Amino acid sequence: MRPGIGSKALASVFGALLLVLLVAGVARAAYELLAPLVPILVTAVALGVIYWVIFRGIRR
């Protein structure tokens, strides 16, 4: 086995591992930042649906 083949395969595996860790870190950071906003968004959507049902439903 020539020395260049194994190191190239190892480098590609290491690069793939670093890419997976980077994506996982970004996803975790986005989750930590957006998690407190989820109840606010759910409440806003629920109030919008209630408003739409009441005011659009009465006029039909």
Image (spheres, grey):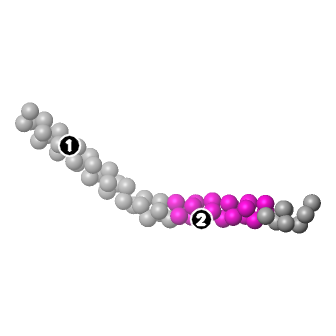
Q: Earlier in the sequence, mark 1 or mark 2?
A: 2
Q: Is residue 51 magenta?
A: no
Q: Amino acid at mark 1?
A: Ile
Q: Amino acid at mark 2?
A: Leu
x then y, percent, for residue 58: 9, 36
Please, what secondary structure does the residue beneath circle 1 have? helix
x then y, percent, for residue 26: 53, 64
Residue drawn at (35%, 54%), measured in percent from left and top? 39
Q: Is residue 17 left or right of residue 10?
A: left
Residue sitting nearer the eye, 13 or 28: 13
Magenta-drawn segment: 9-27
x then y, percent, for residue 4: 85, 66
Residue sitting nearer the eye, 6 or 37: 6
Residue drawn at (66%, 65%), measured in percent from left and top? 18
Q: Residue furthest right?
A: 1
Identify the residue under disc 1. 50
x then y, percent, for residue 53: 17, 39
Query: Which mark is drawn over residue 22?
Result: 2
Residue drawn at (41%, 61%), measured in percent from left and top? 34
Query: Which mark is drawn over residue 19?
Result: none
Label tally = 2
